[in-house]
Amino acid sequence: MQNLYETVKKAQMVVQVEAVRVQKELAATEIDGYCEGELIKVTLSGNQQPIRVEITEAAMELGAEKLSELVNDAYKDAHQRSVQAMKERMSDLAQSLGMPAGLGDGLK
């Protein structure tokens, strides 16, 4: 019984260490999203933190309302890509730890 307890504790430590590693990788990853026509580029980290917004001169000439819409579209695209990257990394982590395939499908 003690041996099983020690095995479970070791497994928990491995999972924690690997999860922290993946989170650090995601924080250092930059993911770009664009609006239609790529007039705006929004960059988020792999854990959805905003990094920067780049706006072209052509977008600036479209007026405040259209510019706001384009920024929002680019942000949504970047967010969707960032969430997908996070899901893929967490799925890879789960598989590398021997967890059953599809365990994290509820996150999709």
Image: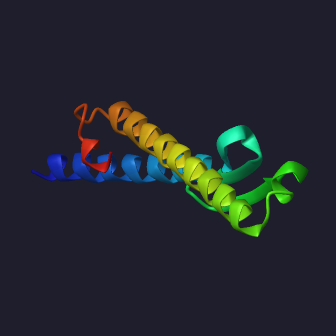
Residue 9: give x, y in percent of width and height: 28, 54
Q: Is residue 80 visible?
A: yes
Residue at 85% x, 59% y is: 60
Scheme of image coloration: rainbow
Is 5 situated left or right of 19 in this image? left
Q: Quadrant of the C terminus?
A: top left
Residue at 73% x, 61% y is: 67
| Of the pair 33 and 69, the residue shown nearer to us | 69
Q: Residue furthest right?
A: 57
Q: Is residue 45 visible?
A: no
Is 59 situated left or right of 3 in this image? right
Is 70 situated left or right of 54 in this image? left
| Of the pair 17 and 41, the residue shown nearer to us | 41
Residue 30: give x, y in percent of width and height: 69, 46
Using the image, determine if residue 1 lies above or below residue 95: below
Number of numbered discs: 0
Residue 41: give x, y in percent of width and height: 74, 48
Residue at 76% x, 58% y is: 52
Using the image, determine if residue 38 lies above or below residue 19: above
